[in-house]
Image (cartoon, coloured by chain):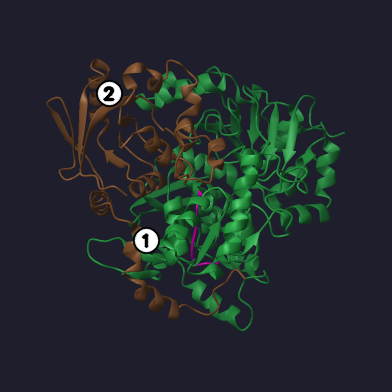
Chain colours: A green, B brown
């Protein structure tokens, strides 16, 4: 029978199948961070259970960690306790951990791929919804809750209800300055924040084929913002090229065997998808959000929409609420919206390619007065690579702050937060009320739009910057 | 986990769609390392508004939350379920739930009853008309009942069974540990390890 990529990966991980019960799936890689794991380790302790496969488990510190003064003890005592709890748990249960200060520390979804741990055809889970990032490699990767974290620690498996499959076919060449972030924001606006519920999305088509691994990760990362359980891209030469030589990637003679296995990870030509969406991105322009969920987005050249024109009652009510929270009026050109802060980073856009793209825009220009720009690399490795290329100097000379690695202002669990009423252009993934700090207002943007916005002080694209280079 | 087959209680009408996990419990409340004590974080930003529905006197003691579509969208934080439970909610009725939230709810003894939006609308109206109206959620019959209305709700069979039995997933899986061993013995040796 013809099968989709997602179904092939699922089938190859079924440990047990019984009528009336969910399939029990084996988990190849379990990533752990400090926020969603303490109660899971507690559960193991209470039951006297070990971690079944510490060698398939990897922990990093990311959500709480400060991005300044990382050689000092964490100032917030509650954050410090949570990080110290992770360190104690990893020591007690023999789980490898990349702590603050370690060269492999960083956001869990940046660290896994850069180590070569995330490989095609694997099952990857983490107590974090943005685990969908790893689907860029053709892995079935999804976020889980703390009870499931405990279950995977104890058994290296998960009982899982079946999912539906959705093909999102993205055709056309992206125009200069248009990125995977703009594509995924447009996809989410098309299918809605709940449109992916119960689905695993496979992204395909010429635009996806042409994307780098970093771009595919950005897109798969935000699958959850459409409500999908996971997003995937079939592995190809781009995938192999990215993986080859990474510390945990297969080495010769295993490499050829691995590639042969990966080559089979394609949806069959006649495979059936429960839903198919086709999007032409040839005419796509930079996309930004105006509201408080990621589906409330529009092209940068357009205006804040009038919720009165929304057909659906709930969407209309949500639209009015969002505009009220965001302090915006219908009809305002999006380019007129002034920001206080620009955040470049996160598991969505905190990789080296993102920093390069933003640096290329801001090189020789200045962050406008009154705007603060935070640049937070996704991992220590990304930070070091950027410094090797001199990107840190570019950002610092432009007046941006060059920080240490972590989740930072994406969710403001560390001191990097918006003040009430402050407005940001952010390369992160969620514009929910208060996400970046209580009362903060978030516009989701691409790295290029973030950099241009920092220069102009209003939402802007690189094309708006002609003649501002000093 | 305490078994639950049927639950009756007063309800709160949360007339909002896309209620995300950052609203249910903001990130600053996630720093604790315990599994209880998250009640103060529940809808923390919205509760700062005295007019917010949970702040009204008639909402005190309610155990059923009735919300618009796509409830629980966003992060994987199980703290959202713990906060709702710690506050006293046993059931959320909605016309749609985010997947991870729904899975977490099933682990944490919180019933997620999915009904049609027009049933949600009717239930909202009934609660507004009489905040004391008793709502009964029957897992065995898969019905939500108030006044003389009864509507069916959707929940998957396995989660329903586990909730009714109060069973722990890890215990269930460990009964099949030999299957796990067999699977592990057949995994390719080139698959990555973390050390």
Mark 2 is surrounded, within 10 Å at the Cα level, by few (under 14), some (14 to 19) or many (20 or more) other residues, namely many
Extreme residue toward the left, this view: B148
- For residue A368, what is the image quadrant? top right
Same chain assignment for discs 1 and 2: yes
Residue A464 in the figure: left or right of residue B20? right
**In front: A2, or A337?**
A337
Task: Give the labeled residue for mark 1.
Answer: B170
Q: Earlier in the sequence, mark 1 or mark 2?
A: 2
Q: Provide the chain ID for the residue under circle 1.
A: B
**In front: B53, or A264?**
B53
- For residue A248, what is the image quadrant? bottom right
Q: Is residue A333 visible?
A: yes
Mark 1–mark 2 distance (CA, rounded to whole Å): 37 Å
Position of residue A218 measured from the top left corner of the image (x, y, whole percent): 58, 49
The stretch drawn in magenta includes residue A51 = no
Residue A159 in the figure: left or right of residue A182? left
Quadrant that contains the C terminus of chain A: top right
Position of residue B36 measured from the top left corner of the image (x, y, whole percent): 44, 41
Disc 1 is placed on an element classified as: helix
**Residue at the spot x=49%, y=79% of the render?**
B188
Q: Provide the chain ID for the residue under circle 2.
A: B
Disc 2 is placed on an element classified as: helix
Residue interval drawn in magenta = A119-128
Task: Give the labeled residue for mark 2.
Answer: B124
């Amino acid at each position: 029978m013809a099968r989709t990529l997602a179904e092939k990966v699922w089938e190859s991980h079924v440990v047990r199948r019984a009528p009336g019960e969910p399939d029990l799936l084996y988990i190849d890689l379990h990533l752990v961070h400090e926020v969603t794991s303490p109660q899971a380790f507690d559960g193991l302790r209470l039951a006297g259970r070990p971690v079944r496969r510490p060698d398939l488990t990897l922990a990093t510190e990311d959500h709480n960690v400060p991005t300044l003064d990382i050689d000092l003890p964490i100032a917030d005592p509650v954050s410090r306790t949570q990080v110290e709890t992770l360190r104690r748990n990893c020591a007690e249960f023999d789980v490898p951990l990349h702590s603050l200060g370690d060269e492999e520390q960083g956001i869990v979804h940046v660290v896994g791929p850069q180590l070569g741990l995330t490989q095609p055809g694997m099952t990857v889970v983490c107590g974090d919804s943005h685990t969908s990032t790893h689907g860029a490699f053709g892995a079935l990767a999804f976020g889980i809750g703390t009870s499931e974290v405990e279950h995977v620690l104890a058994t290296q498996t998960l009982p899982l209800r079946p999912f539906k499959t959705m093909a999102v076919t993205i055709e056309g060449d992206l125009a200069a300055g248009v990125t995977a972030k703009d594509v995924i924001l447009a996809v989410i606006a098309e299918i809605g924040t709940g449109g992916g519920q119960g689905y695993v999305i496979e992204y395909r088509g010429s635009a996806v084929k042409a994307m780098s691994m970093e771009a595919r990760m950005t897109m798969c990362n935000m699958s959850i913002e459409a409500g999908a359980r996971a997003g995937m891209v079939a592995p190809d030469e781009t995938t192999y090229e990215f993986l080859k030589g990474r510390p945990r990637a297969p080495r010769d003679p295993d490499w050829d065997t691995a590639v042969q296995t990966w080559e089979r990870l394609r949806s069959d030509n006649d495979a059936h998808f429960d839903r198919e969406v086709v999007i032409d991105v040839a005419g796509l322009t930079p996309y930004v959000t105006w509201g408080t969920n990621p589906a409330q987005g529009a092209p940068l050249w357009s205006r804040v929409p009038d919720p009165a024109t929304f057909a659906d009652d709930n969407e209309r009510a949500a639209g009015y609420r969002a505009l009220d929270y965001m302090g915006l009026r219908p009809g305002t050109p999006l380019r007129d919206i002034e920001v206080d802060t620009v955040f470049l980073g996160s598991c969505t856009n905190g990789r080296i390619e993102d920093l390069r793209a933003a640096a290329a825009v801001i090189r020789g220009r200045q962050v406008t007065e009154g705007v603060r720009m935070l640049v937070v690399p996704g991992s220590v490795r990304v930070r070091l690579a950027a410094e090797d290329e001199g990107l840190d100097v570019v950002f610092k000379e432009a007046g941006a702050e060059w920080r240490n690695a972590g989740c930072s202002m994406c969710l403001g669990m560390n001191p990097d937060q918006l003040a009430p009423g402050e407005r940001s252009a952010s390369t992160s993934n969620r514009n929910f009320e208060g996400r970046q700090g209580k009362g903060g207002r978030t516009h989701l943007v691409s790295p290029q739009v973030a950099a241009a916005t920092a220069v102009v002080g209003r939402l802007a694209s690189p094309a708006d910057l002609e003649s501002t280079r000093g | 986990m305490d078994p639950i087959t049927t639950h009756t209680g007063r309800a709160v009408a949360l007339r909002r769609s896309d209620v995300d996990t950052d609203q249910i419990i903001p990130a600053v409340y996630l720093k604790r390392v315990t599994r209880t004590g998250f009640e103060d974080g529940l809808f923390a930003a919205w509760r700062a508004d005295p007019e917010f529905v949970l702040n009204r006197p008639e909402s005190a003691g309610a155990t059923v939350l009735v919300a618009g579509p796509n409830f629980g969208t966003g992060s994987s934080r199980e703290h959202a379920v713990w906060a709702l439970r710690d506050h006293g909610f046993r059931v959320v009725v909605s016309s749609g739930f985010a997947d991870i939230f729904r899975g977490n709810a099933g682990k944490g003894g919180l019933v997620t009853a999915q009904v049609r939006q027009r049933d949600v609308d009717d239930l909202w109206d009934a609660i507004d008309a009489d905040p004391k109206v008793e709502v009964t959620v029957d897992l065995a019959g898969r019905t939500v009942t108030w006044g003389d209305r009864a509507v069916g709700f959707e929940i998957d069979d396995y989660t329903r069974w586990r909730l009714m039995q109060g069973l722990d997933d890890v215990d269930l899986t460990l009964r099949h540990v030999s299957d796990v061993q067999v699977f592990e013995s057949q995994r390719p040796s080139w698959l990555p390890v973390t050390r």
